[in-house]
Amino acid sequence: MDHFHYRNGQLMAENVPLEQIAAQVGTPVYVYSTATLKRHFRVFSEAFQGLDALVCFAVKANSNIAVLRVLAKAGAGADVVSLGELKRALKAGIPASKIAFAGVGKTKAEMAAALEAGIMQFNAESEAELETLNDVAASMDMVAPVSVRVNPDVDAKTHAKISTGKSENKFGIAWQKVDAVYARIGELANLKAVGVDLHIGSQLTDLAPFRLAFERVVGLVRDLRAKGHDIRHIDLGGGLGIPYDPDAETPPAPADYGAMIREVLGDMDCNIILEPGRLIAGNAGLLLTEMLYEKQGENRTFYILDAAMNDLSRPAMYDAYHAIVPVAEPSGDETLKADFVGPICESSDVFAKQRNTAPLKAGDLVAIKSAGAYGAVMASTYNSRPLVPEVLVDGDKVAVIRKRQSLDELLSLDEIPSWLSGD
Ligand SMILES: *Cc1c(COP(=O)(O)O)cnc(C)c1O
């Protein structure tokens, strides 16, 4: 459910015509809907009513501070993976006591900053990291609350590049080692084991792998408690999928996911942490772009857009499907097949191949949907294309929440060394 709909023949973001945003801000531009963000957060949270649950938005999905602010006001915590994300979450008003710090490569500086801020927990991913965290905490005369990210070795049956819970992945600590790792934490004076954490992958469209992983974790927590570890938090990660292509996939509803968790973990007497990213932000955003040219190839029509793989890399990186719709509602039923492509000099700069679409012409505005998660955050300046702006809509209000990078800003980072200047 999102709040991007046609009204009077025009695609709207809530009460604002996208055409107006394109005229004001230019294209390409990311547009987010506040009502959609809030709705997704509410529906997801309601699935855990009655449980002691904390929803920590996975900041890596969309780290714009205004977006985080919307979620902070709705009561969200945050799952962060870098000092930059931690700072963004704090700046958005998410209390440190609701922030978990994940990631396989935390630096000492990041650990110190997170300890200083007083975060809820570190989700630790290796023994080496735990030793380092203990040293950093000792140097600050503090005790670091840790959850160990375990690798339950289940196949999430999702795209290989977003599957994380198999033993061959770099994430988490192997099942056979978990016991020893908690024992070691018990020996380290400046660490305290507070929980167990897992995250098996992203864009899962089936509950079965989740259930299998969660059942394994329940067994583990019982075991650890029997050995004297006071496990209070169980962090189940994120990963629940969303309908990118409503005709092709029907991911489980949050209510069913919540019911399954209640069944598996309901009597564990612990705080359950959830880290949805895509589910909250994915369908709350779109990439608004203008068609520059139509080009007839051999047996193919190319629609060349002003957005490219550097602005939205999911199709190039994961072969991801994104619905693409014209901003002006098509008046007739006529359709044809076209390839929607960007201007970058790579054959992977393709948003959709042989997609059914209403006929379009140069100058038409087009919306690439479901781009609110893993869109702007993964943008690059490849081909010296400046980072595109982000706009937030709330009812009939519109705000630029990240301005377009100027070419001057982009070029000003480079410097010619002294020995190369002059003739
Ligand atoms: C990426 C990630 C998430 C969020 O995943 P979604 O599929 O966007 O819900 C949550 N937790 C961890 C540890 C992650 O790496």
Image (tube, rainbow, N blue to C red):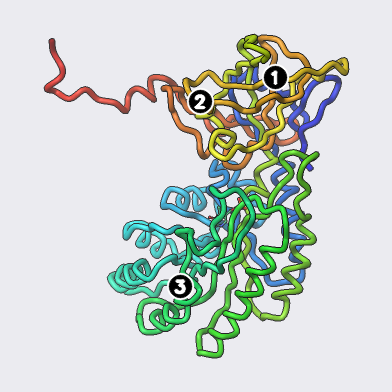
Residue found at x 74% / y 20%: 337
What separation in Å lies between label 3 and label 2 (alpha carbons)?
Answer: 39 Å
Q: Nearer the viewer, residue 317 or 44?
A: 317
Closer to us: mark 1 or mark 3?
A: 1
Q: Position of residue 73 (x, y in %)?
A: 65, 52
What separation in Å lies between label 1 and label 2 (alpha carbons)?
Answer: 29 Å
Q: Position of residue 97 (x, y in %)?
A: 53, 65
Direction from residue 391 to residue 129 in the image, left or right: left
Residue 293's place in the image compared with 314, above or below, is above
Q: Which quarter of the rendered image does ligand 1 occupy?
A: bottom right
Closer to us: mark 1 or mark 2?
A: 1
Q: Earlier in the sequence, mark 3 or mark 2?
A: 3
Q: Amino acid at mark 2?
A: Arg
Residue found at x 58% / y 47%: 68
Q: Earlier in the sequence, mark 1 or mark 3?
A: 3
Question: Dividing the picture into quarters, in which one does residue 21 lie?
Answer: top right
Q: Amino acid at mark 3?
A: Pro
- The residue indicated by pointer 3 is 145
What separation in Å lies between label 1 and label 3 (alpha carbons)?
Answer: 53 Å
